[in-house]
Amino acid sequence: MSDAIALRKREDTAWTLWVVQSCIAICAVIYIWMRALSIPHCGLDCDTKLLQQALVAFFWTALGLAVLSAALLGVARSRLWLWMIPVVGLGLTVIAAFVANYVSDIALRFI
């Protein structure tokens, strides 16, 4: 009986971390999208194509990582390391957000 409870706690923790990963990904996508809306400050000097590519690439990366994490959580239901799947997904999402932000800075001529 206690093994079933421990397994359920691991699954609950992993899915909670997946929700955190998804929420942070949504917030980061909104932030990068808001960066794309700040084009008027530089007029015709901005690289709008690069800015749009950074936004689209980050959106699909964040979505892909969230879907992949959910799929892996469904497959590896009873593993001890189940919580690591969304943590790795969260880390990769944050790294991708920093990269997209840096590319946005380049496109907006801040760097």
Image: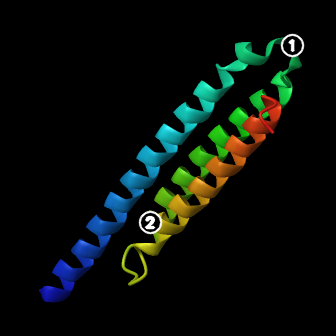
Residue holding disc 1: 44
Residue at (56, 37) in percent of width and height: 29
> Percent from the top left, x then y, of residue 37?
64, 19
Looking at the picture, tell me which residue is in the foreground, 83 or 55: 55
Q: Is residue 22 above or below residue 9?
A: above
Disc 1 marks a residue whose amino acid type is Leu
Number of the front mark, 1 or 2 = 1
In the image shown, does 99 or 5 lie closer to the viewer?
Answer: 99
Q: Secondary structure at mark 2?
A: helix
Label 1 environment density (alpha carbons within 10 Å; few <14, some 14–19, many ≥20)? few
33, above or below 88, in the image:
above
Mark 2: give few (<14), some (14-19) or many (20+) Cα within 10 Å.
many
**Residue at left offset 74%, top offset 36%:** 104
Going from N to C along the chain, the mark reached first, 1 or 2, is 1
Relative side of 94 to 101, left or right: left
Q: Give the side of residue 91 with respect to residue 101, left or right.
A: left
Amino acid type, label 2: Leu
Q: Where residue 77 appears, x then y in whole percent?
A: 39, 73
Q: Is residue 68 left or right of residue 19?
A: right
Could you say where residue 89 lies in the image, as x and y percent from the top left? 54, 61
Query: In the rendering, at what x and y percent does residue 12 appear?
Result: 27, 65
Q: Which mark is residue 98?
A: none
Who is closer to the viewer here, 53 or 41? 41
Which quarter of the figure has residue 80? bottom left
Residue behind mark 2: 73
Residue at position x 40%, y 72% in the image: 83
Q: Quadrant of the C terminus?
A: top right
Per the image, label 1 sits on a secondary structure element best described as helix
